[in-house]
Image (cartoon, helix red, strand yellow):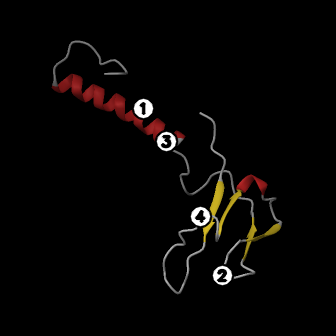
Amino acid sequence: MAAQEGKLSARLRSSASNSWSSDKSAGHLTVPLRSLAVGKEVTFHIPTANTPGVRLQLKAEGCPKELDVHLGFDLCAEEKAFLSRRKQVVAKALKQVLQLDRDLQEDE
């Protein structure tokens, strides 16, 4: 499975009505994160009908390889190793409790 490209989507909300605009193009901006250079600040002008001059300033910063937040749908290596060990312990316990003659297979 290919990695999904990260993007930042932003939409303005009116402070007067406290509701989202029904116009999908006004006050909406999508920025592919790959387009942001690390350490360089980039300014985006957000198109709005009522308020001219709305800007969004972004700056990408480098981060360590090991993230503190899990961003994917797959388990990390430590979780996979734990589950593998747990399967072995559970299989041994089931064999003993159910008085099985043979060991359980990996997929059982």
Real-space CA distance between mark 1 and mark 3, rounded to the nearest whole angstrom: 12 Å
Q: Would residue 28 appear left or right of 18 to someone viewing this image? A: right
Q: Which circle, 4 or 3, is nearer the viewer?
A: 4
Real-space CA distance between mark 1 and mark 4, rounded to the nearest whole angstrom: 47 Å
Q: Name the residue under label 2.
A: 50
Q: Earlier in the sequence, mark 1 or mark 2?
A: 2
Task: State the residue at coordinates (31%, 22%).
Answer: 108
Q: Is mark 1 on a helix, strand or loop?
A: helix
Q: Name the residue under label 4.
A: 24
The image position of residue 63, as x and y in percent, is: 70, 58
The circle on residue 84 is 1
Real-space CA distance between mark 1 and mark 2, rounded to the nearest whole angstrom: 58 Å
Q: Is mark 3 on a helix, strand or loop?
A: loop
Amino acid type, mark 4:
Lys
Q: Mark 3 points at which residue?
A: 75
Q: What element carries label 4?
A: loop
Q: Which of marks 1 and 4 is nearer the N terminus?
A: 4
Q: Would residue 44 appear left or right of 94 to someone viewing this image? A: right
Q: Would residue 67 appear left or right of 55 to someone viewing this image? A: left
Nearer-the-camera pick, 30 or 63: 30
Callout 2–callout 3 Cβ contact below 8 Å:
no
Q: Which of marks 2 and 3 is nearer the N terminus?
A: 2
Q: Which circle, 2 or 3, is nearer the viewer?
A: 2
